[in-house]
């Protein structure tokens, strides 16, 4: 890998600039309550204790693909985290007091090749609806879990919602690692 192509991106940059696709060879999204709440807890801990420090939450390994003039990132590793962060953005968009701060998140920049139900579930979460299909069950369930627990987690750590969101979008960093084209 060319270390010069590794990009540290904050969450807003990650989820607003580029398109990510989950290829068929990846397993289904299967995070549940334990994993999604752990991610929230970890971010909230940093937001409460280390407000001015960056929090690195790992990486997304991608292969750059082109379809016509469009470029997208085939996600090789990191889809569970990427999907959960996309779900979290949809939860945040549903909170009235965050509408203005979340106005940048117009749509998910994540799609699933050959998994129509999961792809549709990511799309309709923005409308506050859920897809009741076994292939999309984890996505809808994690949305409900985050929606139910987010404010309680923040309250338990003494964090104001807007401060958490600002920290999440600006100081939480994920490394995007492209594999070489000839891989």
Image (cartoon, rainbow, N blue to C red):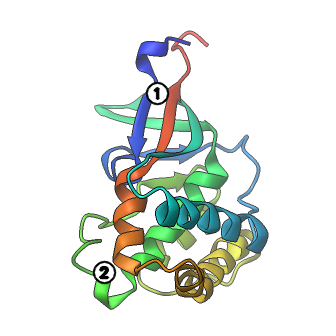
Q: Which residue is rendered at x = 37% and y = 58% of the image?
A: 169
Q: Nearer the viewer, residue 32 or 109?
A: 32
Dividing the picture into quarters, in which one does residue 104 lie? bottom left
The crowd level at tag 2 (other Cα within 10 Å; few <14, some 14-19, many 20+) is some
Q: Which residue is rendered at x = 32% and y = 90% of the image?
A: 96
SS class, disc 1: strand
Task: List the residue tagged with mark 1.
Answer: 64
C-alpha span from label 1 to label 2: 33 Å
Q: Which mark is residue 160?
A: none
**Residue at the front extreme, as displayed:** 49
Q: Which residue is rendered at x = 31% and y = 81% of the image?
A: 98
Determine if residue 131 is in view: yes
Q: Which image quarter is the C terminus in?
A: top right
Dividing the picture into quarters, in which one does residue 116 lie? bottom right
Image coords of residue 31 (percent x, y): 74, 63
Image coords of residue 62 (percent x, y): 54, 32
Residue 157 shown left or right of residue 172 in the figure: right
The crowd level at tag 1 (other Cα within 10 Å; few <14, some 14-19, many 20+) is some
Q: Foreground mark, 1 or 2?
A: 2
Q: Earlier in the sequence, mark 1 or mark 2?
A: 1
Task: List the residue tagged with mark 2.
Answer: 98
Q: Which image quarter is the N terminus in?
A: top right
Image coords of residue 64 (percent x, y): 46, 27
């Amino acid at each position: 890998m060319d270390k010069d192509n590794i990009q540290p991106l904050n969450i807003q940059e990650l989820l607003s600039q580029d398109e990510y696709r989950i290829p068929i060879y990846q397993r289904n999204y299967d995070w549940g309550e334990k994993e999604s709440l752990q991610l929230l807890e970890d971010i909230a801990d940093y937001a409460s204790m280390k407000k001015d420090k960056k929090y690195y939450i790992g990486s997304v390994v991608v292969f750059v693909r082109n379809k016509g003039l469009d470029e997208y990132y085939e996600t090789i590793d990191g889809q569970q985290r990427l999907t959960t962060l996309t779900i979290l953005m949809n939860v945040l968009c549903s909170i009235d007091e965050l509408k203005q701060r979340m106005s940048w998140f117009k749509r998910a920049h994540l799609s699933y090749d050959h998994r129509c139900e999961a792809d549709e579930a990511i799309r309709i979460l923005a409308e506050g609806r859920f897809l009741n299909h076994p292939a999309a069950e984890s996505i809808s369930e994690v949305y409900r879990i985050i929606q139910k627990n987010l404010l309680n987690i923040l309250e338990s750590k003494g964090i104001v919602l807007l401060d958490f969101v600002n920290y999440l979008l600006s100081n939480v960093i994920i490394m995007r690692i492209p594999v070489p084209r000839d891989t």
